[in-house]
């Protein structure tokens, strides 16, 4: 066994003292080992706390980003209505406050060049005629009162007349006694005659027409008095809306509209809050270009189809991102083009440097819309409806392709829109609204 090399001062010590010093050194080493282990545990705990803090910081950063994105949403980059835009975000009076994504029109106000005119014509039998002869000669001042008229030029002024006096029609329910059995019989009044004194059907129709144009109740009473000469109370005017609704409901008209909408190839749906039945309700709309069906209810999925149009519908539903339509699995779902542009605008406005694809996609959608509008104006009908084997020019490329041949997936990446606003504005209706998409031309499959 090799000898240990120890310092001379330790070699001179007695064995007992050397053993004591060695035991003390071992005890210090054990204590240091415990300290190191404790510090290692503390370091691991600090690492865990740092990892938790970093994860929490990342969650908070995502939350802040989400809140900033929500705070930046308004009617121009989301599905929110303009009434929900904060007042403090709107521009001062006198400046343009239009933040919609619709492009400004290039036409000037009024009659457009080439449009058919509608010049006011002279009536052959005016109600009143006034002659305006000259009193004296404009040359020498001679009296012309007794001189004959040698020429005249007609001018007419059409003006509103004061409201005529209302027509009062009296119905007398007469009674007669039978000479044989002595029974007294009373004549039947017309259906619209019930009270001793009441307003007729025409007055009800005119009052309902005013209320249907969103004129307030009190102003409707004033207009009815000024235009028809009939003075009614605000209570009577307020009751007309309910009477008209009851007549429409009992006529079966809404059921007929719902039945027609169920046969349409595409139906556009939406909803908006409104005041009804003394509280806030949602007005649910299902419509085409020529038919509209509205009913009120809550915002639940069941009430979206309470109008009788959507349950069992197997066509195309053009809608926004509201989840209340997701249960309608028997139909194809197409996203509204306007909401697509709003969503793309919201993405681009939040991160312009990283979301440039949103600007490119918006430009592609608007180019497709303009190409479809040009095709319809040229009499080509719905895009994709021409005969098989025909060719169609790709928008902006100068190249042609055969129908029913899919476009390359990277086509939109090769064509960048020119520098400018991220989303072009448009005023014309979106083609998906006036010309619904056809089955077989959608990317979304049946759910």
Image (cartoon, rainbow, N blue to C red):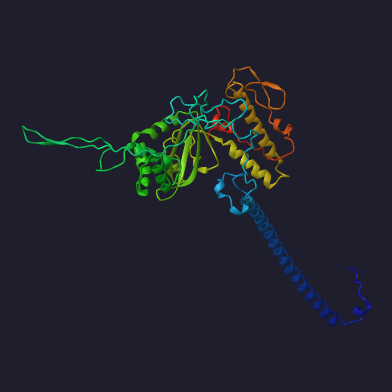
Q: Position of residue 270 (x, y in %)?
A: 50, 40
138 displayed left or right of 415: left
In depth, the one of 90 and 125 nearer the eye is 125
Which residue is nearer to you in this view: 70 or 128? 128
Camera-side residue of 90 and 39: 90
Q: Image quarter for residue 409?
A: top right
On the question of residue 183 being in view, the answer is yes
Residue appearing at x 34%, y 37% in the figure: 247
Direction left: furthest residue: 180
Q: 87 or 258, which lies in front?
A: 87
Q: Is residue 182 left or right of residue 134?
A: left
Instruction: Give the tally of numbered discs.
Output: 0
- Residue 175 image-quadrant placement: top left
Q: Residue at x 61, y 48 (%)?
A: 73
Screen quadrant of the N terminus: bottom right
Where residue 272 sits: x, y (%)?
Answer: 49, 44
> In this picture, is 10 found above or below 312?
below
Q: Is residue 13 left or right of residue 130?
A: right
Location of residue 319 with respect to 42 vertically, above or below: above
Q: Position of residue 292 (x, y in %)?
A: 46, 34
Q: Is residue 306 visible?
A: no
Q: Position of residue 178 (x, y in %)?
A: 9, 33
Identity of the residue drawn at 63% across and 17% down: 390
């Amino acid at each position: 066994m090799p000898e240990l090399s120890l310092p001379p001062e330790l070699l001179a010590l007695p064995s007992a003292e050397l053993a004591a010093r060695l035991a003390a050194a071992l005890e210090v080493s054990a204590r240091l080992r415990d300290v190191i282990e404790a510090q290692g545990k503390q370091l691991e705990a600090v690492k865990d706390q740092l990892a938790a803090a970093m994860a929490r910081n990342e969650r908070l950063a995502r939350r802040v980003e989400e809140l900033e994105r929500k705070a930046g949403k308004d009617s121009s980059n989301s599905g929110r209505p303009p009434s929900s835009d904060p007042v403090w975000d709107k521009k001062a009076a006198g400046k343009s406050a239009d933040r919609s994504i619709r492009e400004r029109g290039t036409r000037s106000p009024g009659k457009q060049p080439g449009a058919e005119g509608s010049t006011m014509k002279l009536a052959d039998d005016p109600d009143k005629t006034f002659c305006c002869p000259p009193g004296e000669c404009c040359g020498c001042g001679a009296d012309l009162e007794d001189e004959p008229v040698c020429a005249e030029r007609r001018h007419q002024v059409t003006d509103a007349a004061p409201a005529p006096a209302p027509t009062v029609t009296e119905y007398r329910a007469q009674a007669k006694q039978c000479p044989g059995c002595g029974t007294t019989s009373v004549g039947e009044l017309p259906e619209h005659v019930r009270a001793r004194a009441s307003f007729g059907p025409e007055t009800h129709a005119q009052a309902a027409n005013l209320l249907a144009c969103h004129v307030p109740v009190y102003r409707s009473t004033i207009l009815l008095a000024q235009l028809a000469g009939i003075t009614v109370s605000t209570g009577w005017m307020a009751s007309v809306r309910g009477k008209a609704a009851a007549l429409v409901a009992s006529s079966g008209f809404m059921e007929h509209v719902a039945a027609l909408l169920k046969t349409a190839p595409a139906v556009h749906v939406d909803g908006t809050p409104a005041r009804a039945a003394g509280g806030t309700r949602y007005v649910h709309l299902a419509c085409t270009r020529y038919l509209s069906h509205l009913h009120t209810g809550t915002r639940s999925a069941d009430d979206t189809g309470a109008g009788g149009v959507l349950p069992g519908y197997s066509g195309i539903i053009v809608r926004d991102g509201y989840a209340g339509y997701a249960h309608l699995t028997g139909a194809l779902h197409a996203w509204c083009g306007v909401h697509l542009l709003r969503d793309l605008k919201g993405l681009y406005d939040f991160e312009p440097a990283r979301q440039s694809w949103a600007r490119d996609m918006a430009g592609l959608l608007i180019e497709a819309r303009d190409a479809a509008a040009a095709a319809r104006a040229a009499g080509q009908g719905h895009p994709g409806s021409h005969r098989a084997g025909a060719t169609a020019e790709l928008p902006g490329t100068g190249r042609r392709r055969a129908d029913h041949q899919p476009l390359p997936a990277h086509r939109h990446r090769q064509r960048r829109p020119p520098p400018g606003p991220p989303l072009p504005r448009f005023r014309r209706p979106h083609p998906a609204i006036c010309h619904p998409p056809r089955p077989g031309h959608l990317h979304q499959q049946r759910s």
